[in-house]
Amino acid sequence: MTGFKSLILWLVILPSSVFSQAIDNTLCYKAIGSKDYIRLNYENDFFSATDIYYTQGINLEWVSPVIKRFPLVKLLIVPFKTNTQYGIAIEHAGYTPTCISHDEVLLNDRPFTATLQLKTFSISIDTISKRRFSSTLSTGVIGQAAGGMEMQTSIHRWLHNITPHGWPNQIHNDLALNYQVDYEQQLIRAGKVFSLDGDAIARIGTLSDKISAGGTVMVGYFESPYGLGNKNRKKVNVYLYDHFQADAIGYDATMQGGLFNHTSPYTLPESAINWFVIENRAGFVISWQNIYLEYFRTQITREFSRGRPHEWGGVQVAVGF
């Protein structure tokens, strides 16, 4: 356990941390009390009637005990081995400037870029002390190989929307390799109707770096997110949640370009990045038996000096086995 504590301390005091994964399904308000499930997460700023910045994210994940045999799992930190979920996910994210109808670069704006990643993760639960610890290894690519131009163009064509321009100026291909750890602690719980949890997150890698601190309030009727193999899955769980998070940003390749490839036609300089960002996510969840449904909205403060606050929404659907 000493080595484990040392690693956490080392991650927390790093001058940079890890940002870039827009979708994070490891925190308590996303908890599914089963060791076997499939979940689809879709995010888009269409829900907020915009088409800028973080414009779309898709994540398909599979959680199952058999994934413990996956080779990359050996690189994960698993402190509570008796109550642990193991999963893998494919995630795609796309980012654009404030206008997608121009062929030329929009200076002082967000560059076009996309990421494609394979995530390998574990969620360990201490059911006695009401703690959750998650670790995630993300491997993939940022740049043309992620297919952002093709995906956004296809979606806009299906919706009879404006054809995106400017993607030829996108950030060029580079390695996307990140490692993230999440720690959560239940602070207050009132039966099955209220809970307050605190959390800390640290990420490091080539795609982005960040450390975060936040908290989650859940109100409704729900089983504890600090348990697995819930025997009451036939009961309906209905709750609202709000998750607040403050981020200290160290590096973000979706704005600054990849760590190794410096040939991108346009990126934002380090001086333009806002190194402190606040996020808030609120959602509504209903689950019954093996079905989980969620709708949410996320707001974020300006990520770069001439940027705007941004908002997007999303839905999640999960099926347990």
Image (cartoon, grey):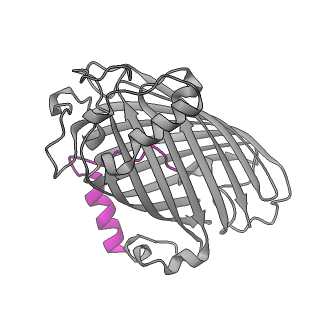
Pinpoint residue 161: horizontal percent, then vertical percent.
53, 24
Q: Residue at x 72, y 58 (%)?
A: 319
Left or right for 84, reference 211: right
- Which corner quadrant holds the C terminus? bottom right
Q: So how many labels did they put on this image? A: 0
Is residue 135 visible in the rendered image? The answer is no
Q: Does 125 appear above or below 160?
A: below
Q: Is residue 272 magenta?
A: no
Q: Position of residue 239 (x, y in %)?
A: 73, 40
Identify which residue is drawn at 33% across, 73% down.
2
What residue is rendered at 26% in x and 43% in y? 253
Q: Position of residue 13 (x, y in %)?
A: 25, 51
Whether residue 3 is in magenta: the answer is yes
Residue situated furthest right in the rendering: 234
| Quadrant the N terminus occupies | bottom left
Residue drawn at point x = 25 percent, y = 50 percent? 173
144 to 86, vertically: above or below: above
- The answer to whether residue 132 of the structure is visible from this angle is yes
Magenta stretch in the rendered image: 1-25
Reply above or below: 164 against 137.
Answer: above
Would you identify the image quadrant in which residue 169 lies?
top left
Answer with the quarter of the image where residue 252 lies.
top left
**Would residue 114 be found to the left or right of residue 13 on screen?**
right
Q: Nearer the viewer, residue 300 or 227?
A: 300
* Percent position of residue 280, x then y: 50, 31
